[in-house]
Image (cartoon, grey):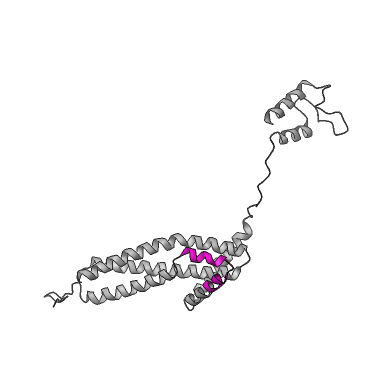
Amino acid sequence: GFSPFSRKGVCRPRPALLQQLKQQRDKLKQYQKRITQQLEREREIARQLLRDGKKERAKLLLKKKRYREQLLDKTENQITSLETMVQSIEFTQIEMKVVEGLQIGNECLKKMHQVMSIEEVERILEETQEAVEYQRQIDELLAGSFTQEDEEAILEELNAITQEQIELPEVPSEPLPEKKPGTLLVLSFREHGFPGQSKMPGPQGPSPLSTQGKSEASLWGWAQVSRMG
């Protein structure tokens, strides 16, 4: 039968194993790219939960986000390891190392698959029984995954998002009233008078826009306002 060892006692990887390594490396890179794109979306959902007063759900989601970030780091290390193996096609006991690398990579892929779908993440916003069940599943998945340092980092991010909510003004739900052109100018003229004219009389005095006694200057000011209207 086929022996993976050359006459010099150096183990050569089987072509099939090298192909598996390359495929797994490529798949890990794809997952890595997708997770990176989804992390910011998860933060946005956490913001929404905090706005709705659902702090515990927001915290749970940030735990899941932290877990995915850790998977990203582990994946990065595994990709580097796989690429090194693929490039080093000849060294002692490579088959054993390749198989071990594939097992680690498969474990990474399996864990990533469990936490990939952003559609599932968005279910945490819902009030349905399915959403409650989803939260329970996340709790079970993440149980024992974090150190004290991780927990502190999660709380720190939660507090940072909470602070963002306090500092940023809420977007008004109703459209702002349109500004009427010329209003500012009229108020200014009422306060300071038209050019070449003293302050406009108060409500008890004659209207500056009456047909009698219009000065040249007040006619000019009215023309400016009318042009803006």
Residue 38: x and y in percent read 46, 61
Whether residue 57 appears in magenta in the rendering, the answer is no
Residue 31: x and y in percent read 38, 64
Whether residue 122 appears in magenta in the rendering, the answer is yes
Residue 214 sits above or below residue 70 on the image: above
> What residue do we see at 46% from left, 70% from top?
67
Q: Is residue 146 visible?
A: no
Residue 197: x and y in percent read 79, 26
Q: Quadrant of the N terminus?
A: bottom left
Residue 122 sits above or below residue 209 on the image: below
Residue 194: x and y in percent read 76, 28
Which of the 4 image quarters holds residue 229?
A: top right
Residue 175 sits above or below residue 56 on the image: above
* Magenta stretch, residue numbers: 116-134
> What residue do we see at 71% from left, 29% from top?
225
Which of the 4 image quarters holds residue 17?
A: bottom left
Q: Is residue 43 visible?
A: yes
